[in-house]
Image: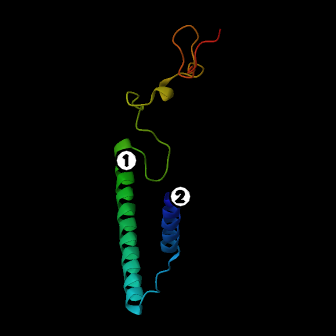
Amino acid sequence: MSTRWMLAAALAAATAVAMAKLPPPTPEQAQAAAAKKEQEQAQLQKEKELLDRAQDRVADRYKRTKGVASTGSSERAGRTEDHNLPKTVKELPRDAGPQGGRQQSAEAHSTPAR
């Protein structure tokens, strides 16, 4: 019986702590929070600009090395190398999927039917 009372008291204390409200911030704290938010926004804007420049550099380098004109033409520099392509890209049409009689497919997770 005493454990129930102790549990009830602990829950009441936890409820009181959870429902407690903080006092409103002072004008100095509000000003500091606004300055911090403004500083974070400036940092975010700077990082966005750096990311945009880095992406532009990568795109320009890609266009130079792959031989694609920057005007948007679909001219190709040659045959695409296929040694780093995923398996599903290298497979011929109608060749992908389960092959009966060879190996158990990846979809067969359950035991064989009786």
The answer to which of 72 and 20 lies nearer the viewer is 20
Q: Nearer the viewer, mark 2 or mark 1?
A: 2
Which percent across, then down, holds residue 114? 65, 8
Above or below, 39 relative to 70: below
Task: Determine which of the numbered discs, if any, sits on residue 62 in the image.
Answer: 1
Amino acid type at mark 1:
Tyr
Determine crowd level at label 2: few under 14, some 14-19, many 20+ residues with C-alpha closer than 10 A: few
Taking the spot 37% from the left edge, 90% from the top edge, the residue there is 28
Determine crowd level at label 1: few under 14, some 14-19, many 20+ residues with C-alpha closer than 10 A: few
List the residue tagged with mark 2: 1
Q: How many marks?
A: 2
* Circle 1: element type: helix
Instruction: Give the color scheme: rainbow, by chain, secondary structure or one colour.
Output: rainbow
The answer to which of 13 and 100 lies nearer the viewer is 13
* Circle 2: element type: loop
Task: Determine which of the numbered discs, if any, sits on residue 74 in the image.
Answer: none
Taking the spot 41% from the left edge, 90% from the top edge, the residue there is 26
Amino acid type at mark 2:
Met
Q: Are marks 2 and 1 in contact (CB under 8 Å)?
A: no
